[in-house]
Image (cartoon, rainbow, N blue to C red):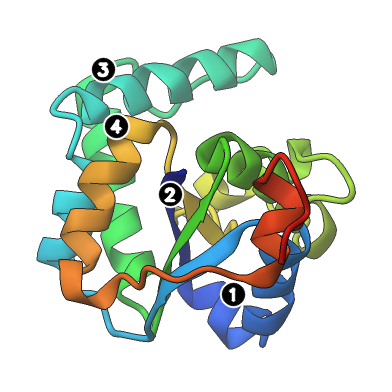
Amino acid sequence: MEKTLVVIKPDGVQRNLIGEIIRRFEQSGLKLVALKMMQADENLVEKHYTIDPEWVEKVGKKSIESYKKKGLTPPNDDPIALGKDVLGRLKKYITFGPVVPMVWQGSQAVEMVRKICGSTEPLSALLGTIRGDYTPESYQLADGDERAIRNLVHASGSAEEAEKEIELWFEKKEIMEYRLFRDSIIYDKEWDV
């Protein structure tokens, strides 16, 4: 069983979407194995986003490509400078208020969670996803306001990333190991409950 990290960001908390977001994951067959509410500090946010040492440059390049694809001029042509700007905005955004980090477990949990969350840019997210249903936010709107995109949740991008992020947000003793009766229905060869 794969584990993945989800963090309900301050806008999700402030909009009272915690229960709705949890419901979406529970209904998909994933199992919640860790949950807490906390105030993240800038140090934790920076560690989280720079687990991949190339994250700053990758985000800068992605931002530049996104602007050009839409026929717009990027605010900066230097991917590292643009990536650092994005990181600064994320620190301000994530530390604004409480967040709810969670660990979800299940078969292909990372991919399942990413599908449920939808595209990182809510405007591009499909209806039926968390981001597609609950926010009309876009990169252009966020950049115009010189702030991070308010997209409600963070979801790990890969199993390797999830493992590192979980270690950053949770101690091992905070992650529960237990079995639900429904696990037999979803995962076992026979439905022996």
Whether pointer 1 and pointer 3 mark residues with C-beta atoms closer than 8 Å, the reply is no
Q: Quadrant of the C terminus?
A: bottom right
Determine the secondary structure under disc 4: helix
Q: Answer with left or right where residue 193 lies relative to residue 172.
A: right
Q: Is residue 129 above or below residue 182?
A: above
What percent of the width, then of the height, locates residue 72? 62, 20
Determine the secondary structure under disc 1: helix
Residue marked by disc 3: 78
Residue marked by disc 2: 4
Q: Quadrant of residue 73?
A: top right
- Gap in Å between the C-alphas at discs 3 and 4? 28 Å
Q: Amino acid at mark 3?
A: Asp
Name which of mark 4 and mark 2 comes first in the sequence.
2
- Gap in Å between the C-alphas at discs 1 and 4? 25 Å
Determine the secondary structure under disc 3: loop
Q: Quadrant of residue 51?
A: top left
Residue at 89%, 47% in the rendered image: 127
Residue at 30%, 36% in the rendered image: 161
Residue marked by disc 4: 160
Q: Amino acid at mark 1?
A: Gly
Determine the secondary structure under disc 2: strand
Name which of mark 3 and mark 4 comes first in the sequence.
3
- Gap in Å between the C-alphas at discs 4 and 2? 9 Å
